[in-house]
Image (tube, rainbow, N blue to C red):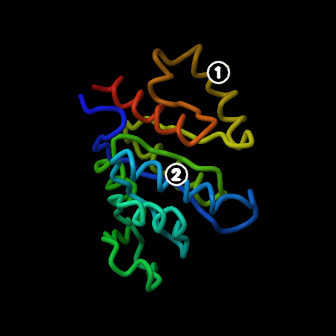
Amino acid sequence: MASPTQTSISVAIFASDKGPGDPERASLMGEVGRVFARKGARMLCLAENGIIPVPLITAARTAGGAVEIVADASIVLPQALADVPITIVPDKAERQTYLAAQSAAFVVLPGSLASVSALFGAWASGASRPVVMLNRHRAFEVVRGFAADVLAASVPHHDRNIQFADTVEDLWNKVLWVFEQRG
């Protein structure tokens, strides 16, 4: 088992800095990128419909992290991301399958409806990946309530499939925990 401070877990991160929502999303994405890079995570970042989580990618790369962009055919990377590896998968279902196949967990940051919709598509595609949500400012409190009220009563070991974190460090620790539970 790798040490909790340095590992090589691959995670698919669902994040968006577009649209209405929490004004601190960009700084939050940067913090996640830096922490996950320092911990040695390989980050797969979804980019589709013109939405690219630039703050997450740039912070992760600056901190020496491994990042791969998984994109639809419409994505044009800004010059600052020209050297970031990109995998173009034109079909949405195939993109979701690719993200699931290449990652050990789905990580969700508070953001726009676009990032949550992309997560739902990937999760509903039949991929058996745990989901860890950063519940900053109670962004996913409704989902947390559903998990506590419905999943806990009907799905054995539901906590191995869905976790909620309140801080970025806690987010990383929950990713490690769900990864260890699947081993």
- 136 left or right of 133? right
Who's the residue at 35% across and 33% down the image?
4
Nearer to me, 145 or 8: 8
Circle 1: residue type: Ala
Percent from the top left, x then y, of residue 170? 54, 34
Q: Quadrant of the N terminus?
A: top left
* Secondary structure found at label 2: helix
As drawn, 81 above or below 31: below
Nearer to me, 183 or 127: 183
Circle 2: residue type: Val
Q: For marks 2 and 1, give the one nearer the viewer.
A: 2
For the residues labelled 2 and 1, the Cα–Cα distance comes to 26 Å
Nearer to me, 23 or 127: 23
Q: Mark 2 sits on what residue?
A: 32
Percent from the top left, x then y, of residue 142? 72, 35
Who's the residue at 41% across and 77% down the image?
81
- 59 left or right of 91? right
Nearer to me, 93 or 133: 133
Q: Mark 1 sits on what residue?
A: 148
